[in-house]
Amino acid sequence: MAPRTVSVGSRAVAPKPCGSRVRSRLAVPLLVLAACGGTQARPPDVGLAPREAPTTAAVAARPFVSPYSYANYVRAEVLAVRGEHAGAVAAYQAALAESDDDTWVQARLALALHASGQREEALELLDEGLSLRPGDAGLWLARGQILLAAGRHDQAIGALERADAFSPRSADAAIALARALHSQGQPRRAIAVLQRRATDNPAAGLSAARARLELALAQGDADNIEQAVSELFRRGPVRTRELQRFARQLEREGRTYLASELMERATLTDETARLKIRLLLQTAAYEQAAVVLAEAPPAWLGGALPAAKAWLAAGEPARALELARTAESTAGGDPDAAKLVIGEALLALDDAPAAALVVSQIPSDSPRHDQARVLAARALMLWDMPGLAREVTASDTSPVDR
């Protein structure tokens, strides 16, 4: 039988001949991504935590898909990503009919069956495959995922332990096992699994380190969080969006120093600038914040006014004053908010009279009026006019209205 052709967009992709011993498993995820218009390929949802995209090393370690079942396999992957589980089941079954000893397709079919509400059929299929190949990690992994989603935790952990033992080159099973252990209140065992995988196989270390940090954050264990961050840095480069996600989690946990340390590794872009600066200001790293602010255009921070506020917080009132005056004159902006920043900057520059004059221009019907009164009173006190400061504080109008 001649190899089938898979059409993706306007291109026809032919699989490599069956006799070839070197077949690229990486081609399958790429085809799925192209067919889905960039949607990330993933296993059918079995109620577990979202999975990350497989690493190249993990993909290369998985079983090959026969060229004769390639077209149906890719179609099944696309349907599974779209949530069309019944169609995915039919396509996986067609792929399996053309290569009935392909345990990888069996595992994928089982997950699709479970996602379509056919749990028992999925487990029966996996049992059948394991009776012939009891050492297949992919079948054990699928079985563990399905059992975990079904609430059969002890059996699930047992299956995932077997999957981990039979796949020393991949982090997938170790991560699934660690998450299952963590969900059952066994965080120490979970972290030990990930540490062992990272030690046994450095190629899987980065994925294991990511998972370890996720579990440490979920647990809220400060020591484990610090160790996980150190391990993540030691293992290699981390994607910028991933750094942002972890940094925000650390910030929510109150670990702002660690979050800031993470973001030091992120490239400065319009997406990372605000988070970098916010964390630096929260940790009182004002000089570093000023360095980042000098590199980031105001547009990256949301405009001249947010940039002015950041410069003011970083202890650079002259830069803040310049940007706030620009914001004050910008059409469609918030001139009263800009006046408040101008006033704060002038106070920081020891020009209390000018500060009082600027904020007194904010009218009494402005939503910024109460803040203006407080700032005007501070300026008047510094201007050595305490009586007028008390009068302004007690009054419902600004000095300019009187």
Image (tube, rainbow, N blue to C red):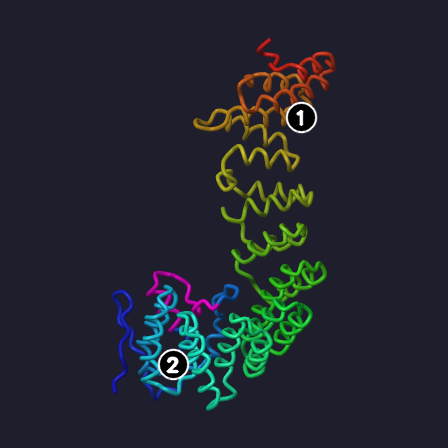
Q: Nearer the viewer, mark 1 or mark 2?
A: 2
Q: Is residue 36 magenta?
A: yes
Badge 2 marks a residue whose secondary structure is loop
* Stretch in magenta: 28-46
In the image, residue 16 sits, relative to residue 270, either above or below, namely below
In the image, residue 303 sits, relative to residue 245, either above or below, namely above
Residue 218 x/y as whole percent: 63, 60
Q: Looking at the image, which residue is at 55% across and 55% down? A: 245
Q: Looking at the image, which residue is at 59% across and 25% down? A: 340
Q: Which residue is mark 2?
A: 65
| Quarter of the picture holding the N terminus | bottom left
Residue 348 x/y as whole percent: 67, 27
Q: Which residue is mark 1?
A: 349
Q: Is residue 238 magenta?
A: no
Instruction: Name which quarter of the figure residue 74 lies in.
Output: bottom left
Q: Looking at the image, which residue is at 46% across and 82% down? A: 126
10 Å neighbourhood of mark 2: few (<14), some, or many (≥20)?
many
User: Left or right: where does residue 93 sit relative to residue 241?
Assistant: left
Instruction: Name which quarter of the figure residue 115 lies in.
Output: bottom left
